[in-house]
Amino acid sequence: MLADFPELRDIPSPSSSGSSSPALDSNTLALLDDFFSAKAEEEQRFSDLVCATHDLDVDDDEHDRKPSAPARMMSVDEYRIAFGEDWQLSQFWYSARFARRLARAIHSLVDPETIIAFMCCPTAYVGFQHEYLHPGARLLEVDPRFDLLARSQFVRYDLYAPEKLPEDLRGTVGFAVVDPPFLNEDTNAKVIEALKLLLAPNAKLLILTGTSTEPILERLYNAPPLGPLVRTALEVKHEGGRLSNDFGCWGSWPESKDLGRDVSDDDDDP
Ligand SMILES: C[S@@+](CC[C@H](N)C(=O)[O-])C[C@H]1O[C@@H](n2cnc3c(N)ncnc32)[C@H](O)[C@@H]1O
């Protein structure tokens, strides 16, 4: 793999004599090699996904070129390989096990007709759709890569432009799941603008976010259907435990405190 990066190959090893240039030790080189291998695998998985999507388009009815909803959703493990985290966009993916628990919890609260908005939480969408392929699921995201994943279920959503949300989705969302990209008041105020446009009158909201924002949540999400919020029993887990922030999950309906209590670890695969 390092053969593809001549600039690294040419860095002298620590054992080279007669050179005062800085050198990378073998552990660092091994780490770099792992990093580039993982990157290459991610790119390969992503381009496989692009090709598969194009194949689907060719099979679509010739007169109807609109992309259809995915007929099968990849697993969270496959997704993590194809969609690397972009830390500039504050992307930190949930663990596969947590995504599965979350999917089961959501499924217990919706019916087949519910429009479910997964806002800024693509792993939650993938985990849910892998299990249930719900026709009313929508993935609201700013990252255009997810257009390929969710096809007709993708809704471009920029936190800073809620007014651009599509007319036909407004007032129809019966269940919204949100993981705001930034842990501050402005971000939550913007999320609320979008939620007010999207939610149906009796909708439920689930918000997954850092516990440091709890005072903001109490203040801003204070009237139905946004709140008051109740902390659920779901313990949010990210892949590899990379996030040091403590996370929690809050629901907008009174019984939400029990959400997640009935899913024991024994119900999960390893
Ligand atoms: C904190 S992450 C939550 C991801 C979640 N942990 C998961 O695994 O699905 C926040 C998400 O917000 C998205 N995001 C970042 N900036 C955004 C913006 N301006 N508008 C909408 N979404 C944004 C990112 O792409 C990212 O997926």
Image (spheres, grey):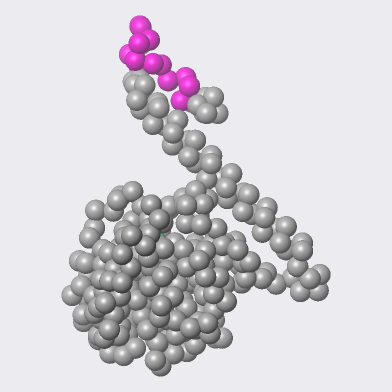
177 or 170, which is in the foreground?
A: 177
Q: Farthest residue in the bottom direction?
A: 201
Q: Based on the picture, tell me whether residue 10 belongs to the magenta stretch.
A: yes
By secondary structure, the bulk of the magenta-drawn segment is best described as loop
Q: Farthest residue in the left direction?
A: 215
Q: Is residue 159 left or right of residue 219?
A: right
216 or 73, which is in the foreground?
A: 73
Vertical placement of 227 versus 209: above or below?
below
**Residue 133, how many percent across, how many down?**
55, 70
Residue at 27 percent across and 84 percent down: it is 255
Quadrant location of residue 197? bottom left
Q: Is residue 36 left or right of residue 24?
A: right
Magenta region, residue range: 8-21
Residue 38 appears anywhere in the view? yes
216 or 207, which is in the foreground?
A: 207
Residue 155 appears anywhere in the view? no
Vertical placement of 64 versus 243: above or below?
below
**Residue 216, how many percent across, how many down?**
22, 75
Q: Farthest residue in the right direction?
A: 62
Q: How many marks?
A: 0
